[in-house]
Image (tube, grey):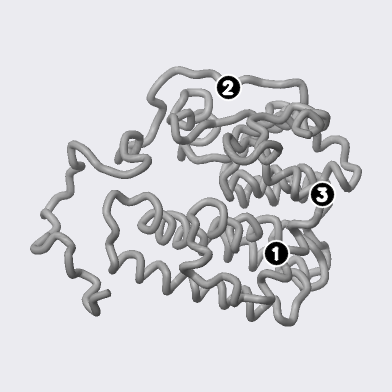
Amino acid sequence: MSNSPLENQPAGYLPAKVWSPKTAYGGQFASINRPVSGARFEQPLPVGKHPLQLYSQGTPNGQKITILLEELLAAGHTGAEYDAWLIDIFKGDQFGSGFVEINPNSKIPALVDHSAAPAIELFESGSIMVYLAERFGAFLPTAPQARAQTFNWLMWQMGSAPFVGGGLGHFYAYAPIKIEYAIDRYTMETKRQLHVLDTHLASHEFLAGEQYTIADMAVWPWYPGSLYGVYGTHEFLEVENYTHLLRWYKTIAARPAVARGRIVNRTSGAPGEFLRERHAATDFDLLS
């Protein structure tokens, strides 16, 4: 490999004074990306029988919420029963009028709590997790130190993951051409983040200390989950070298609620490894 990250890349590019979109882009998501927001077609959202209605897909961000909901149910919070409707982001479902009404940003997940009047609409995974943790009084410590650490790591994940997904993941897995400079830049940052987690978990059982919290549920699908299952960068990043992170990851993966939550709203995988929609606990029984 050349020492120059720009070798074999288009030369002489200078940004225009005013940006304008290209007529066509390559790569996955190219056909649905636009520089404007808002609904593109009329599509009301379905509503099931439970107060909590989740509209999502089983990406790392979507898994955060279904893992939390399954953990709440496992802990005995029967009010956390939910319907999980698939929003297929590869087909552009996130731009339907019903979804955009809940989330003007057109990103999964979105949640509506119909137990309140009027119903409470939520978007952004971190916001949804805090809402559910506070609503059920679970997985968010009340002691000031542990509570602060939980929020520290939750916000860390929300700020850090775009470098993994839209950064390394996009340029490594989805971009129409491989740009060495971009891959190298985001690999550097992703490995730094992995080292942050590995170093911290060398002396902590969970991210906030000794308690399993929403911070763990938020980080787990991304680090190193997405690097294995979504982007296929685990070998490239030498993820196996982060032994403390992997100890933590395997501990959480062994939780039955996590095993259930991680497959909800997934659309593909091995038999028993995906459940397009979830409307009752018995839906998991149909997978066996």
At label 2, the amino acid type is Leu
What SS does tag 3 mark?
helix
Calculate the distance from the C-alpha at mark 2 to the C-alpha at mark 1: 34 Å
276 vs 43, left or right, is: right
Three-letter residue code for mark 3: Pro
Image marks 2 and 3: residues in contact by CB distance under 8 Å: no
| Residue at the image point whose x is 67% and y is 63% from the top | 151
- Cβ atoms at labels 2 and 1 below 8 Å apart: no
Circle 3 crowding by C-alpha within 10 Å: few under 14, some 14–19, many from 20? few
Secondary structure found at label 1 = helix
Q: Which residue is mark 3?
A: 256
Question: What crowding class fits label 1: few (fewer than 14 Cα within 10 Å), some (14-19), or many (20 or more)?
Answer: some
Quarter of the image where the C terminus is located: top right
Q: Nearer the viewer, residue 136 or 26?
A: 26
Q: Is residue 194 left or right of residue 249?
A: left
| Image x and y of residue 41, in percent | 41, 20
- Marks 3 and 1 close (CB-CB < 8 Å): no
In this image, 259 relative to 42: left or right?
Answer: right
Check disc 1 and give the amino acid type: Tyr
* Residue beneath the point at 56% across and 58% down: 228
Q: How dense is the environment of label 2, judged by Cα within 10 Å: few (below 14), some, or many (20 and up)?
A: some
Q: What residue sits 58% from the left and 58% below the top?
A: 222
Q: Identify the mark at residue 249; answer none if there is no mark.
A: 1
Identify the residue under disc 2.
Answer: 45
Q: Residue at x 73, y 71 (%)?
A: 247
Q: Nearer the viewer, residue 2 or 193?
A: 2
**3D distance between C-alphas at marks 2 and 3:** 30 Å
Q: Secondary structure under badge 2?
A: loop
Say whether residue 120 is visible.
no
| Residue 266 position in % (x across, y down) | 61, 38
